[in-house]
Amino acid sequence: MPNNYKQLIENNKSWAKKKKEYSPGYFDNLKLRQEPHFLYIGCSDSRMPLDTFTQTEPGELFVHRNIANQVSITDINFLSVLDYAVNVLRVKHIIVCGHYGCGGVTAAYHGLARGLVGNWISPIRDIAREHKEELEAIQDEEKRLNRLSELNVLKQVGNLCKTHVIQQAVAEGRIDFQIHAWMLDLSNGLIMELEYENTQQKTSLTTK
Ligand code: CO
């Protein structure tokens, strides 16, 4: 694992050289525009570069990441990314992707995070409270935290549907995108699609 930043620069040079050799027009095309079909909302965790797991290239994923993949309807950073993705880029899919073994979820569950991080992940404590019975019935702690990570993704999908950007798209009948709830299992590198409750609004977002 590189710990010298110069190694990263060297890696970059050799990557760019290989790309150009393999496809001479690659960077000419890349610099012209971006037309991604996917908005990826994920955890900041260094193990969560979805492009690697899905073999997608630069230009294919529009990305917003934060600790524990929160969809905060008061986060101007997130909301502007969503606005741009839906209203300008016109992405076809919005993916909220969590992961098992999420440190943010674990810290929230155990009340370990302090300061700004504690503040940021406090909504996950509310999710744990809302699903106390289900979670407490799971004996194995790892499995319980994994379920909480799933519930967190589902909650964030619900938050996404409540945003002005999505509500407006629904009101104007511009539902040309789907919303997906995913979990990444770092123990095998595989993506799992989560089912979520089909309220009328969500159904209209997922049946096209
Ligand atoms: Co995480």
Image (tube, grey):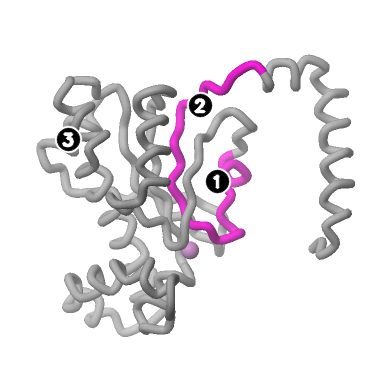
The disc at residue 203 is 3
Q: Would you say the residues marked 3 and 1 are in contact, meaning their CB atoms lie under 8 Å apart?
A: no
Categorize mark 1 by other alpha carbons within 10 Å: few (<14), some (14-19), many (20+).
some
For numbered disc 3, what is the local secondary structure? helix
Task: Tell me the distance, in whole angstroms, between the alpha carbons under discs 2 and 3.
Answer: 24 Å
Magenta-span inclusion, residue 39? yes
Marks 2/3 in contact by CB < 8 Å: the verdict is: no
Q: Which x, y percent locates residue 5?
A: 83, 57
Is 40 magenta? The answer is yes
Q: Earlier in the sequence, mark 3 or mark 1?
A: 1
Question: What x and y, as percent, mark residue 102?
Answer: 47, 67
Please say if 125 is above or below 42: below
Q: Amino acid at mark 2?
A: Pro
Q: Say which label, 2 or 1, has the lower sequence index.
A: 2
Please tell me which residue lies in front, 116 or 60: 116
| Amino acid under disc 1 | Leu
Rendered image: mark on residue 94? none
Q: Quadrant of residue 100?
A: bottom left
| Residue denoted by label 1 | 50
Name the image quarter holding the N terminus: bottom right
Q: Position of residue 139 (x, y in %)?
A: 31, 84
Residue 117: x, y in percent? 44, 71
Is any part of residue 193 visible from this angle?
no
Is the residue indicated by label 1 positioned so its CB lies within 8 Å of ligand 1? no
> Is 65 situated left or right of 21 in this image?
left
Q: Which residues are magenta?
A: 32-54
User: Nearest the camera: 140 or 183?
Assistant: 183
Q: Which residue is mark 2?
A: 36
Amino acid at dot 3: Thr
Picture layout, residue 139 above or below residue 208: below
